[in-house]
Image: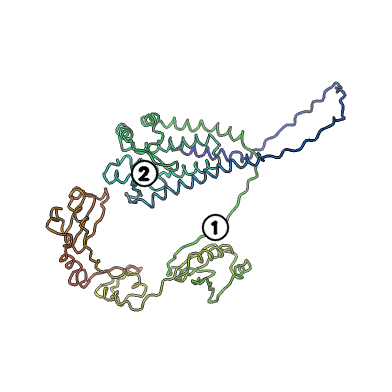
Amino acid sequence: MFYFNRYYLLASVLLSFFIPLITIEVTVDEAPLLVPNQEINFPQTNHNPPNLVSTAETVGLDWVKIALAVPFVISLFFFFRFVQNIALILKKVKSSEVVKFKSHTLVLLEEKSMPYSFLRYVFLSKSSYENGEVSRSILNHEITHVREWHSIDNIFIEFLLVFFWFNPMLYWAKHEIKLNHEFIADQSVLKKTPVNKYKRLLISMTLPDFSRNLTSSLKFSFTEKRLNMMDKQTTLSVKILKGLVTIPFLVGAILLFSEKVPAQEEIQKSRTLSYEVDTEKTEENSYDLDFSLQPDGTIILGGKEIDETFFKEEFLGKIKRNKEPKALLQVLPGTTMGLVSDLQNKLFSIGISHIDLVRLPKEQKENDPEKAEFYKNVTFQIIKDNGSRVNKTYQDLSEKQKSELPDPMKAPEKKSPTLESFEKWKSPENYAIWIDGVSVKNEKLEQFENSDFAFFSESFVHLNARSERFPQKYQVHAYTHSGYEASYGKDSDFLRKRNWTITIKE
């Protein structure tokens, strides 16, 4: 029922603007003109006006203009606030740590805050998340807001309030829409969480709420009504009956507020753009026009440079009119996106319906000694379209295949930890330690100085990646000088002959 309520509320807001545009033709019978049977005598009046004394016109403020300007200024204020709220939320995304939880994006805030969501982001307190204080039920509640795109509803209603801030019904609709969002999210959580447990969880959360009007916040309208709603079960017949009851009100609103407005339908020609098309696939397609765009803005067609006079409607006579014309646009290295966009718009404006855009690769070195040395002992297994396999050496590869190979791996630069970092590593509650590739207890570090290590890497371990054996928030892989030489030195496996087999699909 809550899903029905969501779309019912949104439709009500939309219909309030569109119902007056609906056309209904009605027949009106002209009322008869009533003429009195008796003659009416009017008293005589003096038609000579009295002497008028002219007075000077008082010049003052133009209150009409002021009255018209005030709503505009108020709307301007609400518009800037609307834009600022979105900007502040997006700024939090950029300035905060962003992590992935399954297929969802979590934004970890430095300040203490209730969980809330906006578009595809779920905002959580970083300390609460890292300490495991965020309940899975609460996280699922916010993920439901994200999955159902409730932020779009909020943005829509807030945008309307920018211009119709004087309409009290919009504020009512805003409250009901946001409250219904909470009902939907609660309903989703209650499928996997007992009602009483979820109620206690909500009541226990007392953090301040820093969310904005555009976001979906867990504590929105946290009333007895919302808690009681969790225990209610609405039957299918009641849901259908409630839906049917709205129909008479909708019909009545249309009849009362509709007016005659001509309807127009515009059919727009479709235009498509395929970006970064594979150069091999373009050979299979046929194009009406084949353009090349150079970094200085020069446009080449059929081996000849063209100018602005080309982009006129007369040129379409060169293209068959019984189909939608297609063009291939090859962009040379170094060409800016501004030049590419300008040419795309020109092609669309003259009737091109589809453009395949290809960025030509930079010229590859004929001989890359580092790559040749790195891959000289590697066997490349080429899988052809028909499934057959052919083994090749690096020298047998095409220039395109060579260019697509990763650059040769290099040993990491040496770096020793600072004394401060080294002392932190000794905490078994926060750090899991590996020395020369072997997991050791933190107390093992007492046998070393920070200068004994030639290289290290330290990383944060997210909550869902920790294990019973390694529950720490951080992992450190440290290499002594001898361990570094064994792993990355000239006699190490890292730099020995690589008898690998690499598979390449043609």
Percent x, y for residue 258?
A: 62, 37
Q: Residue furthest top?
A: 38
**Horizontal arrangement in the rendering, residue 355 relative to residue 465 (left or right):** right
Closer to us: 197 or 418:
418
Residue 103 against residue 241 in the figure, above or below? below
Q: Secondary structure at mark 1?
A: loop
Q: Which residue is mark 1?
A: 270
Q: Quadrant of residue 255?
A: top right
What x and y, as percent, mark residue 144? 38, 42
Drawn side of residue 184 relative to residue 487, left or right: right
Badge nearest the viewer, 2 or 1: 2
Residue 113 visible: yes
For the N terminus, the image quarter is top left
Task: Give the image location of residue 220, x and y in percent.
Answer: 40, 36
Residue 185 on image: x %, y % = 38, 39
Instruction: Determine which residue is flagged by label 2.
Output: 143
| 225 in relation to 61, above or below | above
